[in-house]
Amino acid sequence: MRKLCWGLLCCLLILTAGCVPVNVAADSKLGNGGLGGEVVTVFPSATITPSPTLIPTLTQTPFTPSTPVPSPTPTLTPDPNLTFTGPGPVLAPVLMYHHVKPYSTDSEYVVSVDQFKRQVQWLKDEGYQTITITDLVEAIRYGKYLPHKPIIVTFDDGYLDVYQNAYPILQEASYTATMYLIENAINDHGYISDAIIEELSTAGWEFGNHSATHAYLPSSKNMEVEVCASRARMIEKYDLPFDSFAYPYAAKDEASIQAVKDCGYSSGAGNGSFTIHEEERIFFLSRREIKSYFDMQRFITTVTDLR
Ligand SMILES: [Zn+2]
């Protein structure tokens, strides 16, 4: 019987521990009277001791109930300086400039540095904050957090004097702008360079396309090149979205508006008197041009006149 029991134990331990049995004299190992010279198969005492690894896992590893880790709750406290605006009509005057130079000229397109400084100072004192054309379009379409008094400053053609004279004044006021570039004029004398585009873009300025050659689109035979191909090349070159197109001479017809839509722009900038913008005018957004002969009162009326 004892032999049978040891045999069973042996089998069990061989199966579980893979130990090698040895033959020993039972009395020398088991003591307690022995088995009278009977040879039994037994393991050395050291190998009989069950290894801790043989203890079933459930008793070895105490059960620990999983404690749910609280996920961080998103803070929904909006920036107090911003107001959720839209979707729908959005009030935001869009100003259009061309040149800003240190001196006055006869051209209505050249605003002097002094004039520009006073205009920006007035906007700042009145609590206006700049947004981009894309901010405006997104607010109209989807709704977006905008400053309480949003305003958009745009410059057409990409003149170097804007970088030299307007940019520092806008920087001082923590303002940005949207600039519409003529692709073929970039890096030309009097126009901004690739390096300046990168610098302004890093400073938060937005760039839009103003066609390849500043063509008059309603009679252009190269609509695709002026509107589409130029955009594709500039996206590739500058890695910027160029999501808005400004019609050269603010001239448009049905075909040019359609081309702007088909090329994937999200907006088109023209001119006009509206300061409240709506979805149906997104592809010919009203911009109010600031002319060199405007005095401060005319400038203030241009900004604040609601339409
Ligand atoms: Zn232009």
Image (cartoon, rainbow, N blue to C red):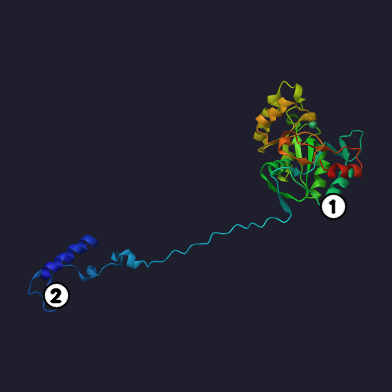
| x 74%, y 35%: residue | 281
| x 20%, y 63%: residue | 12
C-alpha gap between disc 2 and disc 1 = 105 Å
Q: Which residue is mark 2?
A: 28
Q: Is residue 102 above or below residue 261?
A: below
Expressed as whole percent of the image width and height from the top left, the position of residue 203 reads: 73, 46
Q: Is residue 242 visible?
A: no
Expressed as whole percent of the image width and height from the top left, the position of residue 37 reads: 7, 73
Q: Which mark is residue 33?
A: none
Q: Is residue 149 above or below residue 61?
A: above
Depth check: give the residue in front, 259 or 142: 142
Quadrant of the rendered image containing residue 193: top right
Quadrant location, the C terminus: top right
Q: Is mark 1 within 8 Å of ligand 1?
A: no
Tell me the element at label 2.
helix
Quadrant of the rendered image containing residue 27: bottom left
Tell me the element at label 1.
helix
| x 75%, y 50%: residue | 147
Q: Which residue is mark 1?
A: 125
Q: Is residue 207 above or below residue 145?
A: above
Quadrant of the rendered image containing residue 201: top right
Q: Specify which label sits upstream in the sequence, 2 or 1.
A: 2
Please rate how many residues cluster around mark 2, counting C-alpha atoms within 10 Å: few if below 14, some from 14 to 19, many from 20: few
Q: Amino acid at mark 2?
A: Ser
Q: Are marks 2 and 1 in contact (CB under 8 Å)?
A: no
Q: Amino acid at mark 1?
A: Asp
